[in-house]
Image: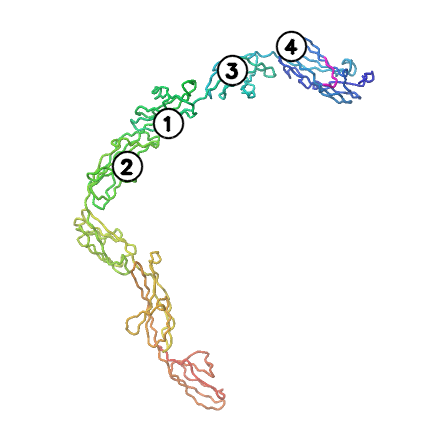
C-alpha cells in the first residue's frame, strides 16, 4: 500500500494533459450526441509525470465528474469514483510520463435534453486537484443531449396488424413523421435472425416485393448524428399466399373463320385450380375447373383471349392472368393465270404459264408469304399436284403426252401456318393445252459407234423416220447447208468441216417445208485423230550379208483422244516389202514397238515403214510413216599387185584394184590412220625382209 507523505505526494503528478485524453466520448460542443433515454461510456487517459510509479489501491486515484447545464439521471450534478486497479483498469501507472486508459464503471445517462458540460478531474489519495504543479489535472467536454424521438407507428398500403398479400406483391411500409430524422425497417421471422431491410434512410417509407409468409415488419426512428432511437409500435405481420403460374396455349395463327381451342393450366401444380376465359374484356367462360375453351370464329387480326388462373375455389385472393393474341392469316385480290399457247406438239415443252394476277397476303409487312402449288389433270381425270418444284407464281410444263388442264393454288403462309382449309378460295382459273402428235425421227450414219477417222466424210440418213414430210439437218445447232427443210432425208458432210464433239441433229416436220409439229434426234460425233508427223530414220546402204542398223523414231504423232481423257489407245506395227510387192507386217514383239531393230541378214534391197494405230470407240485409225529403203551392195573383190623381192632401200610400188576406195595396211597397221581414199597405189623405200602388206575395207560404194 502507498504511503502519501508530503515528499511523495509532491513527487507524484497525475494529469490529463489535454482534452484529447478523453477518448470516449469525443469532447467538443457537438462531437457526440446522446438521447435522454440512451447511455454512453466514458474512457480517459491518466498520465504520471512523477518519478515514482503509482500503484493503485482503494484510496489511490480519485476521479470526479461535475455536470453543468444538466443533471445525471438521478438528479445529481457530481459523481466520484476511486480507481484501484479493478474492473479491468490499470493497476499501476509507471513513472516519468507513462499513462493508462481508464473506464468509468457505469454508463452515463442524462435527465434532460440540451447542451451539457461534463468536467473530469483526477487527484491522488484524499487531495483535490489544483494548486501549484497540478493545473492540468482537470479537463472537460461538451455534448448536446437530444430528446427521444416519438414512438413511430407502422402502417402499410395493405393495412395494419396482419395483412394478406400475394407472393411478389409490392408492399409500401410507412411510419409517422416526427422529430426523428432517419428510419430503419426490420424483418423478423420464426427461427431466423432479424434482417435489416434497408440502411438508415431519411424517407419514412419503404417499398419491397420480397416478403415471405410469416414475416413481421418493425420500424426504428433515429436522430441523424446520434444513436437516439425509438422502436415503433404495432408491428405488421404478413401472410403471403402463393400466386398460380398460369399458362395458356393454342395456335397463334388462324385462317379466316376458324375456331381456336385454348388450353389453360397452372404450372405451379395447385390442386383444383379455377379458370375463367375472356375474349377481349368480355367474359366468355365463367370460373370453373374446365381448362379448355373453344373460341368464336376468328374474323379479325389480333383476336385476343385471356385466362385468369386461380389457386382454388377457396383461395380467391391471388390469380395469374395470361393472354394470347391470334393473328389472322388471310389474302386479298385475284388469282389468275394464262398461257400463250392453246395447242402443243409432242416432245415440245409448252410455253411458261403467265401469272396475270396473284393474291396479296394481308400480313405481308410482317413476313407473311404466298405458297403456290401447280396442279394438272388429263381429260376426264382429277387435279393432282404436279411436283414439289412447281411452287412458284410461274410454271413451265414438261412436254405433254396428252391434252392437259392446269391451275394454280395459292395459299397464305404466316408464322409457319398455311391456310388450306378452303381450296375453292385458293384456286385460279383453269387453262387447257391441247396435245398434237409429232413425227418420230430416226437417224443413221457411216460413223461406226458414232466415231469417224479424221479425213472421213460423214454420211447421214433419216429415211427411217416415220410421220415426217420434211427434214432439216444441223451441226452444232447450225442448219446444214442452210435452213431449208426439204423432202430429202440424206446428207453428206465433208470431212474438212468436221470436228471432234460436233453435235449432229435431224429435225423432222409433220408438214412440208418445215411446218407443223416437229421432233428431232441428235448424236455427238467423235473424231479419232492423230496430230504430228510419223517419221522414221536409218542408214540406207548395207553390204551384202550384213544386219541393217536399227530403224529409229524421229517423231511420233499424238493421239488426240488419248490426251483429252476419252480413252484412245496408241499402238505400232512395222511393215516391209521388196520391189512392188505389198507391205507385210513384221511379227510381234519386235514389229510392235515404237522402234525396230532388224536381226536377220539383208540380202536384197528392202523398204520399211511404221504404221501407228489409234483405237477409239472400237474404231482403228492409222498413220503411216515415211518409207526407208535399205540398199544391199555386192561385196568387192580386192587385188594387190607388186614384186615379191626387192633390195634394201629400193622403192617398191604397190597397186590395188577391185574397189572404189582403198586403205593400205603394213604388218596389220593402217598406214593412213583409218582414212580411205580413191588412190589405189602406194610406194615404200624402207622395206626390210618379210614385210607383209594388205588392203582392208576395200568396197565398191554406190555413189549415185
What's the CA distance linking mark 3 and mark 4? 33 Å
Left or right, 285 with reference to 185: left
Of pointers 3 and 2, the one earlier in the residue sequence: 3
Closer to viewer: mark 2 or mark 1:
1
Q: Which residues are magenta?
A: 80-86
Closer to viewer: mark 3 or mark 2:
3
Of pointers 3 and 4, the one earlier in the residue sequence: 4
Q: Which mark is residue 249?
A: 1
Decide: few, some or many residues near mark 1? Use Cα within 10 Å; few <14, some 14-19, many ≥20: some
Q: Quadrant of residue 331?
A: top left
Decide: few, some or many residues near mark 4? Use Cα within 10 Å; few <14, some 14-19, many ≥20: some
Establish if 585 lies above or below 28: below
3 and 2 marks in contact (CB < 8 Å): no
Q: What residue is disc 2 on? A: 373
Decide: few, some or many residues near mark 3? Use Cα within 10 Å; few <14, some 14-19, many ≥20: many
What's the CA distance linking mark 3 and mark 2? 70 Å
What's the CA distance linking mark 2 and mark 1? 31 Å
| Circle 1 SS class | strand
Of pointers 2 and 4, the one earlier in the residue sequence: 4
Establish if 649 lies above or below 12: below
Of residues 138 and 568, the one nearer the viewer is 568
Q: What residue is disc 3 on? A: 236
Residue 198 at least partly seen = no
| Circle 3 SS class | strand
Looking at the rendered image, the quarter that the C terminus falls into is bottom left
Closer to viewer: mark 3 or mark 4:
3
Of pointers 3 and 1, the one earlier in the residue sequence: 3
- On the image, the x and y values in percent for residue 384 come to 25, 38
- On the image, the x and y values in percent for residue 702 come to 35, 77
Q: What residue is disc 4 on? A: 111
Of residues 171 and 640, the one nearer the viewer is 171
- On the image, the x and y values in percent for residue 334 come to 25, 31
Amino acid at each position: 500500500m502507498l504511503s502519501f507523505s508530503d515528499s511523495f505526494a509532491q513527487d507524484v503528478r497525475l494529469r490529463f494533459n489535454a482534452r484529447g485524453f478523453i477518448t470516449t466520448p469525443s469532447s467538443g460542443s457537438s462531437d457526440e450526441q446522446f438521447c435522454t433515454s440512451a447511455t454512453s461510456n466514458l474512457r480517459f487517459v491518466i498520465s504520471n509525470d512523477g518519478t515514482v510509479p503509482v500503484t493503485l489501491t482503494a484510496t489511490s486515484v480519485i476521479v470526479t465528474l461535475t455536470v453543468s447545464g444538466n443533471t445525471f439521471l438521478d438528479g445529481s450534478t457530481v459523481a466520484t469514483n476511486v480507481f484501484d486497479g479493478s474492473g479491468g483498469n490499470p493497476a499501476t501507472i509507471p513513472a516519468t510520463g507513462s499513462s493508462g486508459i481508464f473506464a468509468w464503471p457505469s454508463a452515463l445517462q442524462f435527465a434532460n435534453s440540451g447542451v451539457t458540460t461534463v468536467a473530469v478531474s483526477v487527484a491522488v489519495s484524499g487531495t483535490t486537484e489544483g494548486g501549484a504543479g497540478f493545473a492540468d489535472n482537470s479537463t472537460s467536454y461538451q455534448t448536446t443531449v437530444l430528446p427521444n424521438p416519438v414512438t413511430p407507428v407502422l402502417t402499410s398500403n395493405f393495412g395494419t396488424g396482419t395483412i394478406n398479400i400475394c407472393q411478389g406483391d409490392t408492399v409500401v411500409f410507412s411510419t409517422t413523421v416526427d422529430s426523428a430524422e432517419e428510419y430503419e425497417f426490420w424483418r423478423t421471422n420464426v427461427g431466423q435472425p432479424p434482417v435489416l431491410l434497408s440502411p438508415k434512410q431519411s424517407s419514412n417509407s419503404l417499398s419491397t416485393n420480397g416478403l415471405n409468409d410469416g414475416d413481421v415488419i418493425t420500424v426504428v426512428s433515429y436522430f441523424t448524428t446520434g444513436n437516439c432511437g425509438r422502436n415503433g409500435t404495432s408491428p405488421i405481420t404478413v401472410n403471403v399466399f402463393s400466386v398460380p403460374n398460369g399458362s395458356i396455349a393454342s395456335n397463334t395463327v388462324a385462317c379466316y373463320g376458324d375456331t381456336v381451342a385454348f388450353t389453360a393450366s397452372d404450372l405451379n401444380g395447385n390442386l383444383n385450380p379455377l379458370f375463367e376465359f375472356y375474349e377481349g374484356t368480355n367474359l366468355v367462360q365463367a370460373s370453373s375447373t374446365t381448362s379448355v375453351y373453344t373460341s368464336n370464329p376468328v374474323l379479325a387480326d389480333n383476336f385476343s383471349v385471356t385466362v385468369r388462373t386461380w389457386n382454388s375455389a377457396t383461395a380467391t385472393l391471388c390469380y395469374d392472368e395470361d393472354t394470347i393474341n391470334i393473328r389472322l392469316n388471310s389474302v386479298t385480290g385475284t388469282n389468275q393465270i394464262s398461257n400463250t399457247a392453246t395447242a402443243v406438239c409432242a416432245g415440245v415443252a409448252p410455253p411458261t404459264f403467265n401469272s396475270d394476277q396473284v393474291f396479296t397476303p394481308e400480313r405481308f409487312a410482317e413476313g407473311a408469304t404466298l405458297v403456290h402449288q401447280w396442279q394438272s389433270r388429263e381429260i376426264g381425270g382429277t387435279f393432282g399436284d404436279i411436283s414439289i418444284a412447281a411452287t412458284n407464281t410461274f410454271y413451265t410444263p414438261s412436254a405433254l403426252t396428252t391434252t392437259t388442264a392446269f391451275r394454280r393454288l395459292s395459299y397464305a403462309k404466316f408464322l409457319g401456318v398455311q391456310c388450306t382449309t378452303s381450296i375453292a378460295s385458293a384456286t385460279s382459273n383453269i387453262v387447257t393445252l391441247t396435245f398434237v402428235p409429232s413425227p418420230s425421227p430416226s437417224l443413221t450414219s457411216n460413223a461406226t459407234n458414232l466415231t469417224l477417222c479424221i479425213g472421213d466424210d460423214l454420211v447421214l440418213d433419216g429415211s427411217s423416220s416415220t410421220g415426217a414430210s420434211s427434214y432439216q439437218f444441223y451441226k452444232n445447232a447450225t442448219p446444214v447447208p442452210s435452213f431449208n427443210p426439204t423432202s430429202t432425208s440424206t446428207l453428206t458432210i465433208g470431212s474438212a468441216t468436221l470436228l471432234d464433239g460436233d453435235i449432229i441433229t435431224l429435225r423432222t416436220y409433220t408438214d412440208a417445208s418445215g411446218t407443223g409439229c416437229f421432233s428431232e434426234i441428235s448424236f455427238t460425233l467423235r473424231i479419232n485423230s492423230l496430230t504430228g508427223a510419223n517419221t522414221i530414220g536409218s542408214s540406207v546402204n548395207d553390204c551384202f550379208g550384213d544386219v541393217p542398223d536399227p530403224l529409229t523414231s524421229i517423231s511420233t504423232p499424238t493421239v488426240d483422244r488419248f490426251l483429252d481423257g476419252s480413252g484412245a489407245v496408241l499402238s505400232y506395227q512395222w511393215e516391209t516389202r521388196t520391189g512392188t510387192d505389198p507391205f507385210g507386217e513384221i511379227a510381234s514383239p519386235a514389229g510392235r514397238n515404237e522402234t525396230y531393230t532388224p536381226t536377220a541378214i539383208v540380202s536384197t534391197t528392202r523398204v520399211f515403214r511404221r504404221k501407228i494405230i489409234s483405237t477409239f470407240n472400237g474404231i482403228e485409225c492409222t498413220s503411216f510413216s515415211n518409207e526407208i529403203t535399205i540398199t544391199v551392195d555386192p561385196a568387192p573383190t580386192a587385188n594387190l599387185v607388186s614384186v615379191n623381192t626387192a633390195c634394201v632401200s629400193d622403192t617398191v610400188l604397190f597397186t590395188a584394184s577391185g574397189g572404189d576406195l582403198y586403205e593400205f595396211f603394213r604388218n596389220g597397221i593402217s598406214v593412213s590412220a583409218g582414212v580411205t581414199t580413191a588412190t589405189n597405189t602406194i610406194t615404200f623405200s624402207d622395206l626390210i625382209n618379210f614385210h607383209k602388206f594388205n588392203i582392208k575395207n576395200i568396197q565398191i560404194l554406190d555413189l549415185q
